[in-house]
Image (spheres, helix red, strand yellow):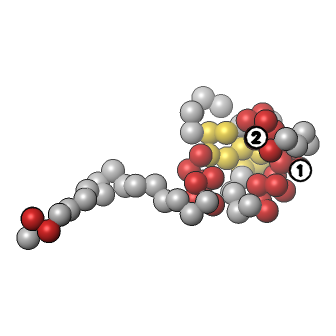
Amino acid sequence: MSSPNVLSCDDLRAITGYQRPADIERCCAEQGIKVFRGRLGPWTTIDLINQAGGLTPQAQNDDSYTPDIL
């Protein structure tokens, strides 16, 4: 996979320590990580892992405002 935000089955294999794609998928599902089934095995994105961990991506237009603008 070409995107740096995508974790391939090989990446997930190294992270989880499981060898079989079904075990990798089960491990991710148990932790609330959404995975997709591809021809080469399950894959996911870093954003989906962060989302499972309770982190939300900051929107590009999400500026911080101070009380001085009022």
Taking the image as shown, residue 32 lies to the left or right of residue 13, namely left
In the picture, the quarter occupied by the C terminus is bottom left
Mark 2 to mark 1: distance in Å?
12 Å
In the picture, the quarter occupied by the N terminus is top right
On residue 23, the disc is 1
Taking the image as shown, residue 63 lies to the left or right of residue 41, namely left
Residue kind at label 1, given as amino acid type: Asp
Q: Are marks 2 and 1 in contact (CB under 8 Å)?
A: no
Q: Which of 53 and 45 is in front in this view?
A: 53
Taking the image as shown, residue 39 lies to the left or right of residue 20, namely left
* Disc number lying in front (2 or 1): 2
Q: How crowded is mark 1: few (under 14 residues within 10 Å), some or many (20 or more)?
A: some
Sequence-earlier tag: 2 or 1: 2
Q: Name the residue under label 2.
A: 15
* x and y, in percent, of residue 2 in the image: 60, 29
Residue at left offset 88%, top offset 43%: 18
Residue at left offset 57%, top offset 59%: 51
Residue at left offset 85%, top offset 41%: 17
* x and y, in percent, of residue 62 in the image: 30, 57
Residue at left offset 71%, top offset 63%: 32
Taking the image as shown, residue 2 lies to the left or right of residue 11, namely left
Q: How many labels does the image show?
A: 2
Query: Is residue 42 placed above or below 54 in the rendered structure?
Result: above
* x and y, in percent, of residue 47 in the image: 56, 50
Query: Is residue 21 placed above or below 28 in the rendered structure?
Result: above
Q: Could you tell me which secondary element the residue under label 1 belongs to? A: helix
On residue 4, the disc is none
Query: Is residue 38 placed above or below 56 in the rendered structure?
Result: above
Residue kind at label 2, given as amino acid type: Ile
